Image: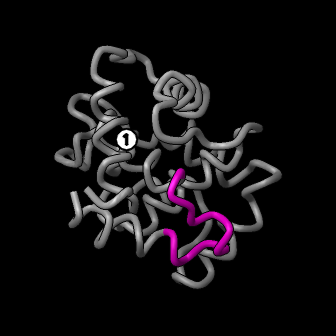
């Protein structure tokens, strides 16, 4: 898990404004990555989603590129990375560009109206995950364990 934080999450958050790098954001990114891919599958098994956070081109990728609160930020990140802010290109790249995948995941969370949940708030974390990711087949039974494990990791466990 420390490898995930060091190699996937920290480099992604470093591309964003400092205010987006919070312990709550890191915990949610870990929990959602565990829920979506277990950090084992860069491409959805039998589906179109890509990256550790399993983004679909017409869903999360397009949403982050077009949302009023994230559009300028993602265009700026793409510019620094010399990547066209195009849904097809970004969707293809996030399968292997871990920092970019993290940026998309963090920005998708940024579109939510409420604060990110803290330790012991797995139910609120689940609600936010469902609201942002809109998974087709959500697996509620695994969430609390992943959420608690994520918080343990970001709090120094």
Quadrant in which the C terminus is drawn: bottom left
Vertical order, 100 against 80 (above or below): above
Q: Pick the quarter of the image with the N terminus.
A: bottom left
Q: Is residue 21 magenta?
A: yes
Q: In the image as oriented, which residue stretches furthest toward the left? A: 40
Under circle 1, the secondary element is helix
Task: Kindly identify the residue that appears in the image at 51 percent across and 21 percent down.
Answer: 123
Task: Measuring from the top left, give residue 144's x and y in whole percent.
Answer: 35, 25
Residue drawn at x 58%, y 72% as measured from the top left: 84
Q: Position of residue 70 (x, y in %)?
A: 72, 57
Q: Which residue is mark 1?
A: 31
Closer to the camera in the image, 114 or 157: 157
State the image coordinates of residue 129 (x, y, percent, origin top left): 52, 31
Q: Which residues are magenta?
A: 13-24
Horizontal side of residue 64 vs 27, given as left or right = right
| Residue 74 versus residue 28 in the image, above or below | below
Q: What is the total number of numbered labels drawn onto the structure image?
A: 1
**Can residue 50 be seen at all in this image of the molecule?**
no
């Amino acid at each position: 898990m420390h490898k995930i934080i060091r190699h996937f999450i920290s480099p992604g958050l470093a591309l964003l404004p400092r205010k987006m790098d919070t312990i709550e954001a890191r915990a949610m990114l870990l929990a959602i990555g565990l829920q979506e891919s277990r950090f084992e599958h860069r491409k959805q098994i039998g589906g179109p989603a890509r990256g550790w956070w399993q983004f679909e081109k017409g869903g999360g990728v397009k949403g982050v590129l077009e949302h009023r609160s994230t559009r300028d930020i993602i265009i700026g990140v793409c510019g620094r990375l010399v990547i066209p802010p195009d849904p097809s290109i970004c969707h293809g790249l996030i399968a292997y560009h871990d920092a970019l995948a993290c940026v998309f995941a963090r920005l998708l969370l940024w579109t939510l109206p409420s604060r990110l949940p803290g330790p012991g708030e797995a139910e609120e974390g689940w609600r936010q995950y469902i609201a942002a990711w809109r998974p087709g087949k959500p697996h509620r039974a695994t969430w609390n364990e992943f959420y608690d494990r994520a918080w343990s990791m970001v709090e120094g466990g």
